[in-house]
Image (tube, helix red, strand yellow):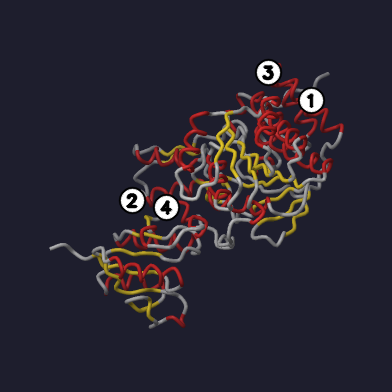
Amino acid sequence: MSHTRRILLVGAGYTARIVADEFVRHQRGEELIAALDDDPARLGQPVGPVTVVGPVASLEQIVQSHAVDEVVVAIPSLSGPRLRAITMACRRLGLPVRTMPGIVELLGLPITPTQLRPVELGDLLRRTEVACDDPPPAYLRGQRVLITGAGGSIGRELARQVCRAAPECVILLGHGENSIHAAHAEMSGEADAPPLVPVIADITDRRTLARVFSAHGPTVVFHAAAHKHVPLMELHPAEAVRNNVIGTRNVLACAEAAGVPRLLLVSTDKAVAPASVMGASKRVGEWLVRETALRSGRRYVAVRFGNVLGSRGSVVPVLERQILRGGPITLTHPDMSRFFMTIPEAVYLVLQAGGLDDGGELYVLDMGAPVRIVDLAEDLLQLSGRAPGTVPIVFTGLRPGEKLTEALWEPDSEVVATGRGDILRVTEGSPSPRGPALDRLVRRLGVAARRGDADAIYRHLHDGLATFTSSRLPLPVA
């Protein structure tokens, strides 16, 4: 005789009630036996076929007294630390845990038990303050939206969420044919997908880019294409400049010439007091956006945020592979920390920022407290079922261009809330090149990149960016 799995539900709110009703409706060999919730007013109240029998702190006691086989957490807004505590308690008891995705993963989708899945690392880092249950931004409706870097993890998620806003069409632009083909094939298969236009083009080729703008007439541009691997760009600084500076200049020039009214540059926290050519090149890109917006009077803005879980180059897949092999886990430093968001959450906020009616502004996504990479690794070990200490952790030292900690803005910046979720407006205090001075900096960087002159690239970045520091900076020219 098959055993009916006894499920303990954590949560008694809207989502939990829907999940409870669906459990009853589908009858898949699973039986809800009780619910937990921290709201005292809900104690003894029904949640579908069961009642709330206590607070979440009583989980271990209820598991033992009710012979629980599995725990289901049905609170999409639950904070990462609280979900971590529940998950770790269940691990100690030998119980599996499933949860609902955060609300950013449910935009436009009904809530059903089929969306329950094992707890993942992104859940443990889940932020609670961001209200991500709004409909897709209205400014995208009926627009021709061009996304550069559309084959990458950020660009592809941008396209997915833009598609939900009923645009006229979405132009997927990228340099890699395989990634653009995959993105186009994936999204074309979705119900009610708008027209999707795959375009293979290199943003460093302005003539080709101008033809793309002329042929497709975008009215909104999200510029996500970038070289972003810090140590790799330290080895190839000319490519960082070509893509992140010259490519961004080309996108802006084509957008301005085509009369595109709205553009957003996806930037990075590594642009703050940069220690790498990647970070410094993205900072110059932010300046170019500001300059073009001020000159044209259009809504061109930059949005800066930190690491995203699951993106290409993220530390998480590397750690997962190392754990799967049995170790060692290689980390650079025990004190290294980074800001993290899930890809859907970061992109959701990027789209919200794109709708703010300002031009030339720099926005920052408030990503909460930074997370130590060693804590990230230990969470992954726990989620993989490995006992602490069974997989060794080895510290290898900082790589070229890396910093122990990142910041979202520099100390002398003015930071104010926008009233739109966790989106902050940043006005930099340090002087930065504008007008002819910025043109000279970009021109000199372009010449140095064409020549492959790494020393000149670092020297020009140092001269133009007061807070740029690097161990590769050459001695001053006599």
Image vertical order of residue 30 relative to residue 458, above or below:
below
Q: How crowded is mark 3: few (under 14 residues within 10 Å), some or many (20 or more)?
A: some
Cα separation, mark 4 vs mark 3, equals: 43 Å
Of callouts 3 and 1, the N-terminal one: 1
Q: Nearer the viewer, mark 3 or mark 1?
A: 1
Tell me if mark 2 has few (under 14), some (14-19) or many (20+) residues whose alpha carbon lies within 10 angstroms of its own: few
In space, the residues marked 3 and 1 are separated at their CA atoms by 14 Å
Secondary element under disc 2, as helix, strand or loop, is loop
Q: Do tag 4 and tag 2 residues touch (Cβ < 8 Å)?
A: no
Residue at far right of view? 436
Where residue 126 appears, as percent x and y from the top left, is: 51, 57
Circle 2 residue: 385
Q: Do the residues labelled 3 and 1 touch (CB within 8 Å)?
A: no
Q: Which of marks 2 and 1 is nearer the N terminus?
A: 2
The three-letter amino acid code for the residue at tag 2 is: Gly
Distance of mark 1 from mark 4, alpha carbons?
Answer: 46 Å
Q: The disc labelled 4 sits on which kind of residue?
A: Glu
- What residue is at 75 percent from the left and 30 percent from the top? 461
Dividing the image into 4 quarters, which one contains the N terminus? Answer: bottom left
Q: In the drawing, does residue 125 fall left or right of residue 142?
A: left
Q: In which quarter of the image is residue 451?
A: top right
> On the image, numbered disc 1 is attached to which residue?
443
Q: Where is residue 375 in the image (x, y as percent from the top left)?
A: 48, 50
Callout 4 secondary element: loop
Residue where numbered disc 4 is placed? 120
Contact flag, marks 1 and 4 (Cβ < 8 Å):
no
